[in-house]
Image: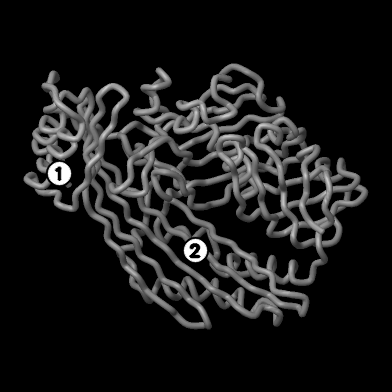
Amino acid sequence: MISREVCQRVLHKAISTGADYAEIFAENTTNHAISMIASKVDSIRDTVIAGAAIRVYKGMRSVMASTVDTSEEGLLKCAESAAEALGQGTAAMDIVLKERLFGDIHPVKIAPTSCSNKEKVEVLKAGYFAAKDYDESVVQVSGNLLDVDHNILIANTEGTYAQDRQIRTRIAISAVADKGTGTQTGFFGPGRRMGMEMFDIIDPKNVGVVAAKQAVTMAGAGYCPAGVMPVAIESGFGGVIFHEACGHGLEASSVAYGQSVFAGKLGQKIANEKVTAIDDGTIPNAWGSINIDDEGTPAQRNVLIENGILKSYMIDKFNGRRMGMASTGNSRRQSYRYTPTSRMTNTYIAPGTDKNEDIISSIEYGLYAASMGGGSVNPVTGEFNFSVNEGYMIRDGKICEPVRGAALVGKGSEVIQNIDMVGTDLDMGQGMCGSSSGSVPTNVGQPLIRVSTITVGGR
């Protein structure tokens, strides 16, 4: 996108007032989205995002400026703006950029940009009508097919000059069912860091069936009783509880400022010994995977918690300065318009040794959360409130009737202490995580787990 020679001249301009670090982040991204509702294609949208950001540090001060003009003249003006905002001083470093080729561990066979809208619409229709035709109680369906071709370049005064191309594809089906006692919604939205070959392993018809089945089941369910009880949380998107209630508290953007219950606790026991939690940006073709982060640091597999002991945080370069720790390859941003910070990639609770049937049979009376929904979290305290999209009562060690309106209420630091059984079958769920650096694709995951005691909201 931008030559090494131009980047070197722009970086020299960026440090001209005494910065001790400077960075260029440039991108050219194409977003393509097709949506369906009322049995027809509602919209086909293409969005192109192109521009660059220049960031400079001086000690613990940071300034970022951005521009849509990626010519050398435009970049030099942007660098001058950042340098002037940082203050007065003189440059004191030589800059020699060397191209870094980190390789691509996420091969794409069929780039979505090479496929016609007709091909994509046929895929979306398969998922849409599978949901619509699932049951007569399904009263509404909406569907979306998304693909992103995200090209980035990072150059910095440490000598990095690197590029990455990130292609992602996702299908999402939402179904609404009504059996006369109020509407209920089901949703399924699998995605991968892949092209259209994703649909060789993910059947769009199955996506529609999963969404519709959830809606129909919950439409015929009674309300969940409230109380404190054990809960079994299913694999896959059930990992959203760890992601939200604990994962954000392990990001340097919170830890570096002491705004996390986990700050200063490296080497300490913070979770049940059954819990090992990992953030891994290197999983081939996973939704949240990267080759390099948005500061040019290679993706890594970071063990955050091992057998209950806090081992690591997720760290970006700037917050790493405050912490005196190196980047872990977790700096991410939605686009060049956002300042990057520490973010999760693919974060999950690792498989344990407990059998699924033993986890369920161990609960005399409790809740089985088959599918988790959204919620809210206080990142400082870890207090959370999450809805259960699909839930069932457990009685005498058996999964019984479905229940609607369930919510899980608790505190992240307490929940990970109360995870006392962890299954063997890891699965992942896909989502978009929002934070100060915008919305980025992240995987959440876990096997089936048991939380020995948690507050269940209901009626």
- Give the Cα separation between the discs numbered 2 and 1: 33 Å
Going 42% across and 53% down the picture, which residue do you hit? Answer: 194
Q: Is residue 41 above or below residue 96?
A: below
Q: Quadrant of the C terminus?
A: bottom right
Q: Residue 243, how many percent across, how many down?
A: 57, 41
Q: Amino acid at mark 2?
A: Ile
Quarter of the figure with residue 152: top left
Q: Amino acid at mark 1?
A: Ile
Label 2 sits on residue: 171
Q: Position of residue 63 (x, y in %)?
A: 26, 35
**Local crowd size for mark 1, using a 10 Å CA cut-off: few (<14), some (14–19), many (≥20):** some
Judge the density around disc 2: few (<14), some (14-19), many (≥20) Cα neighbours within 10 Å.
Answer: many
* Looking at the image, residue 99 lies above or below residue 311: below
In the depicted structure, whether residue 201 falls above or below residue 79: below
Left or right: where 116 falls relative to 39: left
Residue 128 picture quarter: bottom right
* Secondary structure at numbered mark 1: loop
Q: Residue at x 65, y 40 (%)?
A: 383
- 399 relative position to 215: left or right: right
| Rendered residue at 82%/42% (across/down) | 230
Q: Position of residue 109 (x, y in %)?
A: 37, 55
Q: Which mark is residue 353?
A: none
Instruction: Mark 2 and mark 1 in contact? Answer it, CB < 8 Å.
Output: no
Nearer the observer, 259 or 67: 259
SS of the residue under disc 2: strand
Q: Nearer the viewer, residue 72 or 188?
A: 72
Between 359 and 437, the one lying in front of the other is 437
Residue 140: quadrant of the picture:
bottom right
Which residue does the numbered mark 1 point to in the structure image? Answer: 2
How many numbered marks have been drawn onto this rendered protein structure?
2
Camera-nearest residue between 79 and 348: 79
Residue 335 image offset from top left, x and y in percent: 32, 49
